[in-house]
Image (cartoon, grey):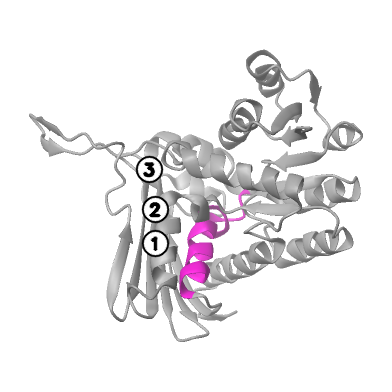
Amino acid sequence: MKKLQIGIAGLGRLGKVHAKNIASKISNAELVAACSIVPEELEFAKTELGVNNTYSDFSEMLKNDDIDAVCIVTTSTEHCRQIEAALDAGKHVFSEKPLGTDVAQCKRAEAAVERHPELKFMLGFMRRYDKSYAYAKKLVDEGKIGTPYLVKATGIDPESAVQGAIRFAKTSGGIFLDMAIHDIDLCRWFLNSEAIEVYAMGSTFKHKEFKDAGDDETGVAVYKFANGAMGMIHVGRTAPYGYHVETEVVGTEGTIRISAVPEKNLATVYGTNGVCTECVGSFPERFAEAYLAEMEEFVDCVIHDKKPGVNVYDGTKSTAIGYATTEAWKTGKIIRI
């Protein structure tokens, strides 16, 4: 069987994760090209991954007829433009979240997907492919906790990565589009409903650089859903102990908690600091298996002509909620979605 020939755009922290998976862990895929505006990242692709075709211009990479599909892991503001260009060039597309930083961008991506029904498009909401989240969703769908009526989600990046967040704050779309899009998607997924109202707020106590960039280091949002259910999201960028992600789904007959303690492993340390469980250090570490599983699904969908589990409309809906959350955060008002 011919391997799917993939070119990747963006080789930052997450781009390297996808690139390594494609290059060495997915048997029916091959990484044949890489694009980045950072010379060191292209050197990484050449020396570490054996990629011979490297580009500093995305449009130039698309001219390579040997490429069947592209993986887009670039700055959020570039996603929709590159999705459209890649589809129009006849390439299947996997794009990282968010789909776009506003709804108009997302509609542009939707139109491109609809123009090319012969091509596959998949958006990277990898938490749906994490074993714990997938298992929780299965239990919810089976009615094990009755009717779900509340999702509480927390996602806080480690303090050790804060300088990167500060560096990209001006182009991230704001804390909720940047940080909360996975949690928004999970609320929709678990509650099987769409958010219709949101109130949000943010604060900065440690790194004023976020305020200088028109952003915040921490945000909280509360949602009302069309079926009467509720959502609560807490996102941030300054966890001193590591990467903190957890989700709780509350139903009429029970509750499911996922990663209540975001453990690094099953080891417990007994020492001078008491009894300690180490925290996972980063999202690539916590969701390593999920990132691989979602890329395997994308490749499988292309090769076997199947429909991906996450589509462009999921991206638009989550972005619309994220954009409304951003408006609520900036205005201090309750926003109808």
Q: Which mark is residue 132?
A: 2
The residue sitting at 45% across, 46% down in the picture is: 208
Q: Residue furthest top?
A: 47
Q: Is residue 268 left or right of residue 36?
A: left
Crowd class of label 2 (few under 14; some 14 to 19; many from 20; radius 10 Å): some
Q: Return the mark for residue 136.
A: 1
Q: Amino acid at mark 1?
A: Ala
Q: Disc 2 and disc 3: Cα gap in Å? A: 17 Å
Name the element at disc 1: helix
**Residue appearing at x 70%, y 50% in the figure:** 301
Name the residue located 60 percent from the left edge and 65 percent from the top edge: 318
Residue 134 visible? The answer is yes
* Mark positioned earlier in the residue sequence (3 or 1): 1
Check residue 24 for magenta coloring: no
Q: Residue 119: x percent and y percent? A: 82, 53
Q: Nearer the viewer, mark 2 or mark 3?
A: 2
Q: CA distance from mark 3 to mark 1?
A: 21 Å
| Residue situated in front as seen by the camera: 26 or 32 | 26
Q: Which residue position is annotated with label 3? A: 243
* Mark sitting earlier along the chain (2/3): 2
From the viewer's perspective, is 117 left or right of 122? right
Task: Give the side of residue 262 with respect to residue 322, left or right.
Answer: left
